[in-house]
Image: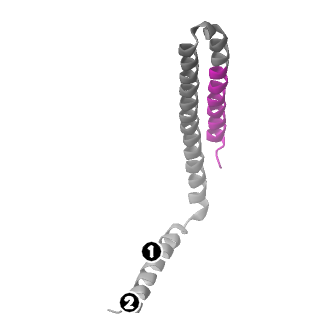
Amino acid sequence: MSLKSKLSLSAVVTLALVLVPGLAFAADEAAANKFNANAWLAAAAGFAIGVAALGGALGQGRAAAAALEGISRNPGAAARIQTPMILGLALIESLVLLSWVIAFFLQGKIVM
């Protein structure tokens, strides 16, 4: 089998694999679209919570590590380092909670 016929055969198979499922799913587009949109909204809400929790945990870990390193280098400045660190940790956690609220708003937006 020559290279040209292999390429044409692979092109036909690729087109068949791409187009046939689209025709099968186009049968009842109105009902399928409603559930598809709800599934994507639920996936977006879950993704938002996951990314926010990951980012918040990484940010809080770095902030605590930097503060502890500063305290270990200069123990006399522990009080001046601890207060801004706690404020920074609270602000990082507020961003995580804000994404949690946005995720619930996304979950509540149901397509009818």
Give the residue displayed 54% in from the left and 20% down from the top: 69
Q: Is-magenta flag for residue 81?
A: no
Dominant secondary structure of the residues highlighted in magenta in the image: helix
Give the residue displayed 65% in from the left and 32% down from the top: 101
Front position among marks 2 and 1? 2
Callout 2: SS = helix
> Would you identify the image quadrant in which residue 26 lies?
bottom right
Q: Position of residue 25 (x, y in %)?
A: 51, 67
Judged left or right of residue 55, residue 16 is left
Query: Which amino acid type is marked by label 1?
Result: Leu
Instruction: Name the residue nearer the viewer: 31 or 22.
Output: 22
Q: Position of residue 70 (x, y in %)?
A: 58, 18
Q: Residues within 10 Å of mark 1 (few under 14, many from 20)?
A: few
2 or 1: tag closer to the N-terminus = 2
Q: Which residues are magenta?
A: 88-112
Query: Which amino acid type is marked by label 2?
Result: Leu
**Residue located beneath label 1 in the image:** 17
Vertical position of residue 40 compared to residue 15: above or below: above
Q: Residues within 10 Å of mark 2 (few under 14, many from 20)?
A: few
Q: Are marks 2 and 1 in contact (CB under 8 Å)?
A: no
Q: Position of residue 105 (x, y in %)?
A: 66, 37
**Residue located beneath label 2 in the image:** 3
Q: Position of residue 37 (x, y in %)?
A: 60, 52
Give the residue displayed 53% in from the left and 14% down from the top: 72
Quadrant position of the N terminus in the picture: bottom left
